[in-house]
Amino acid sequence: MFRPGSKLLIYSLSFSLIALVISEVVYGQQVDRIKLERADYLENGVQGDKRFDKVIGNVMFSQKDTRIYGDSAFFFKQENLVEIFGRVRVLEGDSITITGGKLIYQGDQKLAQMRKNVVYRDPSMTLNTDFLDYDMIEHMAYYFQKGRLVTKNNTLTSKKGYYDTEVRYASFKDSVRIRNVDGLVEADTIQFNTVTEVAYFLGPTVITSNNGTILHADEGGIYRTREDISNFSGAAIETTTYLLHGDELYADRTKEYYTATHNVSLIGKEDDVIINGDYGKYWKEQGVTKIYGNTLMKKIFPEGDTLYISADTLISIEDSIPSNERLLAFNNVLIFKPNLQGKSDSLSYHLSDSLIYMYDDPVLWSDKSQMESDTISMITSGGQIDRMFLNTNAFVTSLTVDQYYDQVKGRNMTAYFKEGKLSQVDVNGNGESIYFEIGEKDSLVMGMNKIVCSDMRLRFKEQKISDITFYSPDGSFIPFHEINPESTKLENFSWRSYERPTRYSVLGDEMPGNTADEKVKKQLPDRIKPIEADAAKPTVKDLNRLQKVN
């Protein structure tokens, strides 16, 4: 039987219980109270309108799976808050330990604010700082006044950072550095997985390897620190002698292998050589760089003149001996200078002595002269040709007037140039010559000289034969009215002016005022795919050619 007013009492008690439950819930989660587990000494105190317990000696608090230790503390039981001093240690579960000199722990928010010589440890890393806020509900640890994170293989430092303790994922901001046995990484913003030790970059980055190679990246990228492999956008690899750049760059520093894709450029710091292409591969140990796809080489001379060479593939070879450093061009080689043009299947360019070697159907043009042989080599000086060697089946042709051509052929020839113009040709062995007498006033053909000899020397003036010296000659002069058109050509004569490279055929979209061919752009992949080193080694054909020109 209820007494009068008992219902009101029940309602009051029920309301109080509901209010108590509501007060114990924060953001939809029921709050666990902080409990004092032990202390050597305890006394009560008041701070304003707040009551607290002052505990000293072997202090220990707990909240569910969290245990807190220290030398002394102020415990605000009503506020569910504790301030701990001395040798502070926080244990969360079985995997996280935080130590420091001072802690403010807010039990309702499960927020640990640790200060002074803070050390955070979990199975994947150790974090050192003087200012750490750890949100246990969100599993996030923050620092704002410099921090150092150490994993098995890496040490990361920055001014600011946060760490997701659940997925073991860290973000670093402002003056970020990663040090490991391979070198140093510097960036403004890095995200780092402490389990996999993979770093993600969100801005400009510099990676300096212990071997002296430097990677510069303007945009984001990924760095797998354990394997020392990275993928970056808008990046360049720099050595003491070369700079390799591409829109996308893949680097395997363990194998010292690098690839570049889209807008690739290789710059020789010492030789004033620039090579452009769509794709590039670099083997640092072998000192070999291979560039292919719309390739173009530019050799800049001190006088301001430039030699351009295009080919399907260009290979640059470094060497500790300067005379062994060279550039190799394979397939559809085209050469362009204002006073010299040429083509061949393959080419070797020795940078130290400015020796260019052309083989497999080489042909060169200089003003009105065309030069052919099985192989052609030339020595340049100051951007101009000094001497040219035509070896085996040498043939020099010059357009005289109309369809009449002066021709010289022999076993081998040596051509000499002055200020880039042909001045003399020495023919050695099996010499043959056809040249036409031209009237000085009316430029009419007067007759044709046809001579066979052992050797000969031809001198040129204004790109025309001015004087010839024959050795053991046998020849004749044929007046114009007796010339048979079929006899005006030596055997194997071929005037190949239609093959003569132009500035546009060599430079293509590099021509001033031209835009890139959109069709070529569409053929390129949108993003680089990591290229395995083994799959990118020079082919057997490449190696055979390398052996051939050594």
Image (cartoon, rainbow, N blue to C red):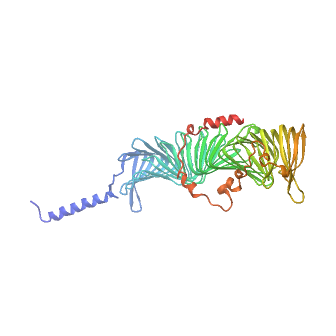
Residue nearest the viewer, comparing 97 with 368:
368
Q: Which residue occupies the extreme left position in the image? A: 1
Q: Residue at the location (39% across, 49% down)? A: 42
For the N terminus, the image quarter is bottom left
Q: Which percent across, then down, holds residue 120?
A: 48, 45
Q: Quadrant of residue 19?
A: bottom left
For the C terminus, the image quarter is top right
Q: Quadrant of residue 491?
A: top right
Q: Is residue 311 visible?
A: yes
Left of 548 or right of it: where is 127?
A: left
Residue nearest the viewer, comparing 511 with 165:
511
Left of 41 or right of it: where is 126?
A: right
Q: Which percent across, then down, holds residue 374?
A: 74, 39
Q: Residue at the location (64% across, 38% down)? A: 542
Q: Which percent across, then down, holds residue 353?
A: 79, 42
Q: Residue at the location (35% across, 58% down)? A: 27
Q: Which percent across, then down, holds residue 186?
A: 60, 49
Q: Is residue 464 visible?
A: no
Residue nearest the viewer, comparing 403 with 183:
403
Residue nearest the viewer, comparing 543 with 212:
543
